[in-house]
């Protein structure tokens, strides 16, 4: 092949390269489809939904964790369950990145995987579990039903070293945040919609205290700052201590557009949340979502699908893990 290419000169090299690229794009995009498991494991999506439901009734916060999981998995290279891998002698773990601080309930992913393995071993990927649990978790909390394709494969590696170049920090500038989301195909409105996921869950004090001490961030509502100080009484919280505030302190376990109303009244927890209001490119969307919950849900669903389809691995690049926390032996 190499000699042939040389023989025919540079133009055929370009053609070959072009064909290889085309094939590659085709390969990567063609594998996701609706009901991918309809023949190989017809009850796969139902089993996941049952498990999400059951776990939610035992530990409501599981539903919240699934929503954060998909963001932290799909933003980093691909929706490939790389976020689920544990640290071993052979490999690093994205879970140890500061950006992934506070992520929880990974052991219940294994509960779901076991239920799937019992019914159809070696068929359903952990990457699809990450995607479908997020989809179903949103419904458990009162959010929209979202139709989602399946057929993702699992990575054979974790990308700890890359996490910080894909997942924004709590205090990054809005232009950096927007460029990160643009990179995976989500536009400005879509980014504002996805951050609406912060209508549920919690934030640990380590991600808040710099807005309270030594002086209170002037973009923070003073009464809300007083309340936050009761949640986070020390300027230097012990990172191991379970000190946190609720993302949406009125109803932190309900999926709604209250997040946007909160940030419009200067009651956002993170700097990035508050910047959606202070940045003129994002503010118009904040207003729209605050005014119309269905509009928020529609726009959220649209961007959620884009995020969930980021660069899926095909069979030869990945595998179907037997357990989600480590690669197959
Ligand atoms: C600029 C983008 C984002 C930044 C900087 C960011 C940052 C954070 C931080 C710092 C926390 C608190 C972690 C802790 O202290 O425990 C958090 C929580 C959370 N984030 Fe984000 N986030 C972003 C976008 C998203 C997106 C797009 C989603 C989902 C679509 C999401 C879902 C969540 C959820 C559900 C929680 C609560 C987790 C829990 O209570 O267990 N975030 N985020
Ligand atoms: C953002 O917060 C981190 C700690 O989480 C801190 O090290 C960094 O200096 C902050 N960056 C800016 C731009 O304030
Ligand atoms: C709210 O958004 C929905 C869905 O996008 C739309 O059909 C409806 O007309 C909007 N309502 C108002 C009052 O603008």
Image (spheres, rainbow, N blue to C red):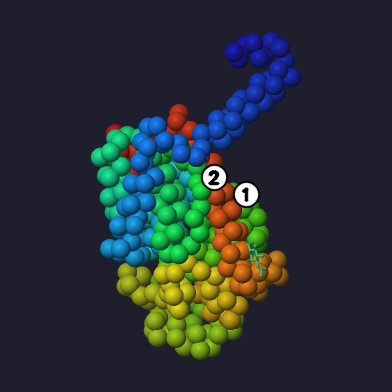
Mark 1, residues whose alpha carbon is within 10 Å: few (<14), some, or many (≥20)?
A: some
Let me know if residue 159 appears in the view: yes
Q: Position of residue 23 (x, y in %)?
A: 60, 26
Q: Position of residue 262 (x, y in %)?
A: 55, 77
Q: Residue at x 41, y 36 (%)?
A: 37
Q: Position of residue 192 (x, y in %)?
A: 60, 63
- Label 1 CB sits under 8 Å from any ligand 1 atom: no
Indicate the secondary structure of the residue bearing disc 2: loop
Q: Is residue 87 above or below residue 206?
A: above
Check residue 310 in the rendering and tell me which mark sits there, or answer none. Answer: 2
Q: Is residue 151 above or below residue 102?
A: above
Nearer the observer, 326 or 111: 111
Q: Quadrant of the C terminus?
A: top left
Circles 1 and 2 in contact, beta carbons < 8 Å = yes
Indicate the secondary structure of the residue bearing disc 1: loop
Nearer the observer, 111 or 1: 111
Whichever of callouts 1 and 2 sits on the residue coming sooner in the sequence is 1
Residue that numbered label 1 is attached to: 185
Let me know if residue 325 appears in the view: no
Q: Residue at x 38, y 54 (%)?
A: 95
Mark 2, residues whose alpha carbon is within 10 Å: few (<14), some, or many (≥20)?
A: many
Image quadrant where residue 12 sits? top right
Q: Position of residue 231 (x, y in %)?
A: 39, 81
Q: Residue at x 29, y 35 (%)?
A: 121
**Whole-number angstrom distance, CA of label 1 to CA of label 2:** 8 Å
Q: Is residue 166 left or right of residue 235?
A: right
Nearer the observer, 28 or 150: 150
Count the numbered circles shown: 2
Image quadrant where residue 179 sits? bottom right
- Label 2 CB sits under 8 Å from any ligand 1 atom: no
Q: Quadrant of the N terminus?
A: top right
């Amino acid at each position: 092949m190499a000699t042939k290419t040389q023989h025919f000169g540079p133009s055929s090299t370009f053609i070959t390269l072009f064909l290889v690229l085309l094939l590659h794009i085709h390969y990567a995009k063609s594998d996701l489809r609706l009901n991918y498991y309809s023949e190989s494991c017809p009850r796969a999506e139902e089993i996941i939904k049952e498990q999400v439901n059951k776990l939610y009734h035992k530990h409501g916060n599981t539903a919240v964790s699934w929503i954060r999981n998909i963001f932290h998995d799909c933003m980093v290279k691909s929706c490939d369950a790389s976020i689920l891998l544990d640290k071993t002698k052979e490999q690093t773990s994205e879970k140890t990145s500061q950006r992934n601080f506070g992520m929880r309930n990974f052991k219940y992913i294994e509960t779901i995987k076991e239920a799937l393995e019992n019914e159809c071993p070696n068929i359903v990927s952990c990457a699809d579990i990450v995607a479908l649990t997020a989809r179903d978790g949103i419904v458990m909390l009162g959010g929209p039903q979202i139709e989602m394709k399946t057929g993702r494969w699992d990575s054979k590696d974790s990308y700890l070293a890359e996490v910080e170049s894909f997942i924004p920090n709590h205090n990054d500038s809005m232009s950096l945040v927007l460029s990160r989301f643009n990179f995976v195909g989500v536009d400005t409105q879509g980014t504002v919609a996805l951050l609406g996921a912060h209508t549920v869950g919690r934030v640990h004090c380590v991600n808040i205290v710099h807005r309270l001490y030594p002086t209170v961030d002037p973009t923070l509502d003073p009464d809300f700052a007083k309340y936050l100080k009761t949640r986070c009484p020390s300027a230097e919280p012990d990172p191991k201590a379970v000190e946190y505030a609720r993302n949406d302190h009125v109803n932190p376990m309900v999926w709604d557009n209250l997040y946007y109303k909160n940030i419009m009244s200067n009651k956002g927890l993170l700097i990035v949340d508050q910047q959606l209001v202070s940045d003129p490119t994002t503010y118009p969307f904040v207003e729209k979502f605050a005014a119309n919950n269905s509009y928020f849900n529609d726009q959220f669903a649209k961007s959620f699908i884009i995020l969930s389809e980021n660069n899926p691995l095909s069979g030869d690049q990945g595998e179907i893990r037997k357990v989600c926390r480590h690669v197959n032996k």
